[in-house]
Image: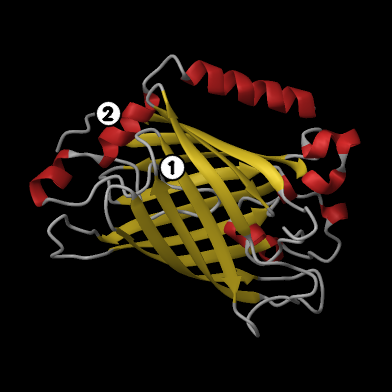
Amino acid sequence: MQKNNIALIIGFCLSTLQVTAQDDLLESLNNEQSKKKSLTIASFKGTRLINSPTLEVVGRRALDFRIAHRFGPFNSGYQNFWGIDGPATIKLSFEYSFDGRFMFGIGRSSAQKLYDGFLKYRLLRQTTKNEMPISVTLYASANINGQKQESLPYYHNFTGRMSYAYQIIIGRKFNEHLTLQVSPTIIHYNLVEKSTDKNTTMAVIGAGRLKFTRSMALTFEYGMRLKGMTNDFSSYFNTASLGIDIETGGHIFQMFVTNSTGMNEVQYIPYTNTSWKDGGIRLGFNVSRVFAIGNRKK
């Protein structure tokens, strides 16, 4: 099963080199409305950086299909080929926007068989002349744990499987090379497995992109959980990721290392259980394809 997953993903990546899907994404972010109002464009290359949502929204009448993959941890050793043999997690998702400002999406992750749906709204947008110095985007998601009942004996009803994430994403593109954002975040579980776990977690996620050549950029994310408003610090760790974006043939491939296995906010913020210090990091990558759906002109 693991080999089939890897073959599927590699095949998808190779096939995308023959099309101009990422050009559609860049065109979406560079829409006519942006030009008329001198709005800042392409602060990030996509709607997610590594794990976390960015301040970006796909363009008007655009559908983004995304594959995200995480291998096993490096500290699993040479017999496991430092995590390449697994266990791995994969997530498939679709994101769509009617107007380039309000976006919604659905996804499914192999970790906890998690299904998610989300809404994203661009409240404020930075302008090139600094009439508006920052961008502000609102994000909310609802998640359903899809594991079999025998795996979740403490869940007695459907609502117990539900969890939620809320973010206010505030960011600024300082120049053509540097973009930074910060995201105050609230995670809520209707029901938790351990009596020591908290139903509600609060955190602040910092993320950034530093473009150092025309086709390459460094990316990073760090999630700081707030003491007193999160789970036991001795059992779980702050999420931290470092990666690189590579533009190839008009496409963006995101490759990175991260200590998080889960790819949903309700997973990697409160429940990251491996650390950079002991080699509990893993290789991961994201790839997306954008399709134009209908007439994108105003």
Q: Identify the residue position indicated by label 1 in the image.
A: 217
292 to the left or right of 76 = left
Q: Position of residue 114 (x, y in %)?
A: 67, 50
Q: If you read the primary sequence from the N terminus, does the residue marked by circle 1 or circle 2 appear first?
A: 1
Q: Which residue sits at x=49%, y=49%?
A: 219
Picture quarter with the N terminus: top right
**Measuring 87% from the left and 41% from the top, which residue is drawn there?**
77
Residue occupying the point 86% across, 62% down: 153
Along the line of sight, which residue is nearer the eye, 124 or 258?
258
**Residue 295 location, quadrant:** top left
- Comparing 36 with 164, the one in front is 36
Residue 172 visible to the viewer: yes
Look at label 1 and name its amino acid. Ala
Residue at the far front: name it: 212
For the residues labelled 1 and 2, the Cα–Cα distance comes to 32 Å
Q: Which residue is mark 2?
A: 294
Q: Would you say 10 lies left or right of 198 here?
A: left
Residue 45 is left or right of residue 115, and the answer is left
Looking at the image, is 199 positioned above or below residue 73? Answer: below
Q: Amino acid at mark 2?
A: Gly
Image quadrant where residue 100 sits: top left
Badge nearest the viewer, 1 or 2: 1
Q: Nearer the viewer, residue 7 or 176?
A: 176
The spot of residue 193 in percent (x, y) is: 80, 69
